[in-house]
Amino acid sequence: MTSLLRTIFSALLLSLLFPLSGCTDKGVEIGKTTIQKDTVWQGTIKVTGDVFVPAGVTLTIAPGTTVKFVRIDEKSDRNMFGIDSPYYPQAELIVQGRLIARGTKDNIIVFTSAERDAKPADWGAINLLGGDGNVIEYCKILFAYNGIHAHGASARIDHNEFTKNAVAISVKKEEEAPGVPWFGRPADISANFNYIHNNKGGITFRSSRAVITRNTITDNKFFGIWPKEQSTAEITGNEISENLKGIYFYKSAGVRIAGNNIYDNKEYNLAIADEQNVDVDARNNWFGTTSRDKINELIYDRHSDPSVASILVEPFLKERVKEAGQ
């Protein structure tokens, strides 16, 4: 094959693999756009308004890609579906189809703000609505309102870093949009080996299915994990420390919490909200000490307020879980 033919063949192969017109390492702008067919993003993508991935379409984001979201005003014309839940006033990636954002350990994908004075909530979310098979792996997600948000969708969320977001991961059963195909469907996520730090909140789930394992969740302003309402969830093998509240329960039931290191949170390691009337089983965790009195000092439950439920912690582990965290 001559040099010219090899060049033509290589260019044709790249055009087939990366069908987004104009997408090069120098970057491309996209916004207030519906992706009509399976598409791969690579290089630098500047998002100037909502991007919608409809049912039946897959958006794949290549390792090493940086996706930057421009800060938009809620009165702008850059929102596709309004600004009320499950949507955001900020620019967002709205996925009813499927998202495959699979970086590698040495070549991560970055989702961030395009602004020089970047701050939390510059952009809305990776907003998963009703779709299955979503994968977010080896990504760094910064300056979002919700890094990952899911209504009635399923996703595998592994080996990522979430920092400087309002909330890192927020998932729930779809109860706010009657008439959509996924109405009444719980979200279903698996979040493992993530580093979740320096956000306003870590992981929250409501009326959903969740497996939350081997994450390091630290230094979040308000909470590490916030379970809400009846869910089917396992919280195991996590390192949860230096948050205002380690785990905060609101009307929570159906959650298994075991084999975690939950210690040195600033206000409470475990705390119950006013409307929690079901006892919480948090036995077989390490709380940073073997002193029952010291453990009690960082628990807010019926012992502090007789009107709320109890948190059961005995038996507790006598030493830290060595394999917990990332």
Image (cartoon, rainbow, N blue to C red):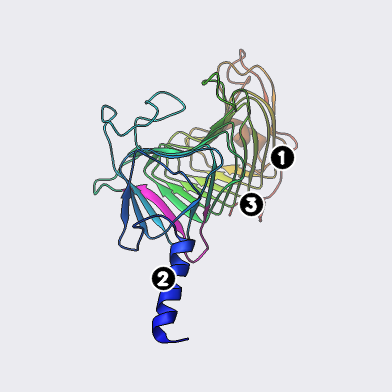
Q: Does the magenta stretch include residue 136?
A: no
Residue corresponding to mark 2: 11
* Quadrant hosting residue 303: top right
Q: In front: 267, or 169?
A: 169
Disc 1 is placed on an element classified as loop
* Image disc number at residue 324: 3
Q: Residue furthest bottom?
A: 2
In percent of the image, x 48 and y 43: which residue is there?
242
Which is nearer the N-term, disc 3 or disc 1?
1
Give above or below for 290 relative to 296.
below
Disc 3 is placed on an element classified as loop
Amino acid bearing label 1: Phe
Q: What stretch is highlighted in magenta?
A: 101-113
Measure the C-alpha gap from mark 2 to mark 1: 61 Å
Residue corresponding to mark 1: 316
- Residue 146 seen in the figure: no
Give above or below for 147 relative to 308.
below
Q: In front: 17, or 266?
A: 17
Give above or below for 319 relative to 171.
below
Q: In front: 159, or 318?
A: 159
Q: Where is residue 317 in the image (x, y as percent from the top left)?
A: 71, 44
Residue 223 vs residue 230: left or right?
A: left
Q: Do the residues labelled 3 and 1 touch (CB within 8 Å)?
A: no
Residue 156 vs residue 220: left or right?
A: right
Amino acid bearing label 2: Ala
**Mark 3 or 2, which is nearer the eye?**
2
Within 10 angstroms of label 2, few (less than 14), some, or many (20 or more) residues? few
Which is nearer the N-term, disc 3 or disc 2?
2
